[in-house]
Amino acid sequence: MAEAVHPRGTKPRRRLSGRNIMLYGTLLVFSLYYILPLWVMVMTSLKGMPEVRLGNIFAPPVEITFEPWVKAWAEACTGLNCDGLSRGFWNSVRILIPSVILSIIVASVNGYALVNWRFKGSDVFFTILIFGSFIPYQVMLYPIVILLREMGLYGTLWGLVVVHTIFGMPILTLLFRNYFSSIPEELFKAARVDGAGFWGIYFRIMLPMSLPIFVVALILQVTGIWNDFLFGVVYTKPDLYPMTVQLNNIVNSVQGVKEYNVNMAATLLTGLVPLIIYFVSGKLFVRGIAAGAVKG
């Protein structure tokens, strides 16, 4: 039977097999599963309350209004305070920046030392760190309250920074250790022969080669810290509540009319920071997480 002849420079068309149809169909279903709620949130946040009450949640707004976004940011009330999410946003920023910097610096040095500068008891130390990542947060709530109170940090932003730094250490140390173990050992030995010390090798060799895993650590910490509710509501006081706690208070407020458009806008505003960071550095995230998961 003669084979089909294709003109020079053209590729034969690929027919969709049953397996491909199932694959694309499954991907389409999952995409709709995640996109539809986001669509509803965005459309509702751009509608006025009279249009929201009509009940057609999937329909785009007849008349677009950004008043719900303005109210969610600066005017929504939680108890006696009517300053919206703005106060919680700046509290979250003040918590996020030092928590991310401290946890990444400490975990990267830990991972580097565990791979290249093994000390007596390093395996025990690493085992304890990994075990710490499996302890439920709820078990540690009250003991940490006592510790922060004795340190004079309970109810402060710096107390919450300490908590996020400690709880981010186990998983970040594991990621950095696995990533640094994938770097050729010959580079480390050559640097030692040339007289480089602990910090010289760390800053001149390890850091320049470790951008992907630092991006992974950044995304994990930003997402976890920014989206945290439990620690924020337990270890701070109302004036210092992070954005997620403010969002909860706005959405669950029982005063006046339930404004679904404002609630949707507030929810979208709360999720913008980790979403933007992930989209900006998504490729590096995939590279880093793959490299940090191979060895160890």
Image: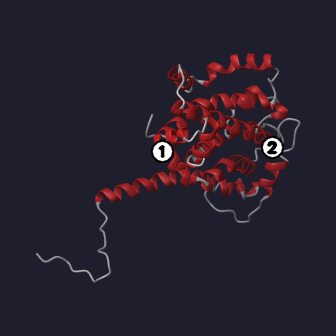
Quadrant housing the C terminus: top left
- The residue located at (74%, 64%) in the rendering is 64
Q: Amino acid at mark 1?
A: Ala
- Look at the numbered disc 2 and give the secondary structure of its residue: helix
Q: Residue, x 50% and y 23% (percent of image)? A: 123
Question: Quick one: which residue is furthest to the front in this view?
Answer: 194
Q: What is the total number of numbered labels drawn onto the structure image?
A: 2
Q: Is residue 230 visible?
A: no
CA gap, disc 2 to disc 1?
Answer: 34 Å
- Mark 2 Cα-neighbour bin, 10 Å: few <14, some 14–19, many ≥20: some
On screen, 68 above or below 135? Answer: below
State left or right for residue 83 relative to residue 28. right
- Residue positioned 32% across, 79% down in the render: 10
Residue lying at the far bottom of the rendered structure: 7
Q: Tag on residue 90?
A: 2
Q: Position of residue 295 (x, y in %)?
A: 44, 37
Q: Which mark is residue 228?
A: none
Callout 1: SS: helix
Q: Position of residue 102 (x, y in %)?
A: 70, 35
Q: Is residue 118 above or below residue 207?
A: above
Callout 1 crowding tier (Cα within 10 Å): few <14, some 14–19, many ≥20: many
- Tell me which numbered mark, 2 or 1, is placed earlier along the sequence: 2
Residue 56 sits above or below residue 180 on the image:
below
Tag nearer the camera, 2 or 1: 1
Q: Is residue 195 at least partly visible in the picture?
A: yes
The quadrant holding residue 7 is bottom left
Q: Amino acid at mark 2?
A: Trp
Q: Name the residue rendered at 56%, 27% in the picture.
A: 133
Q: Which label number is shown at residue 291? A: 1
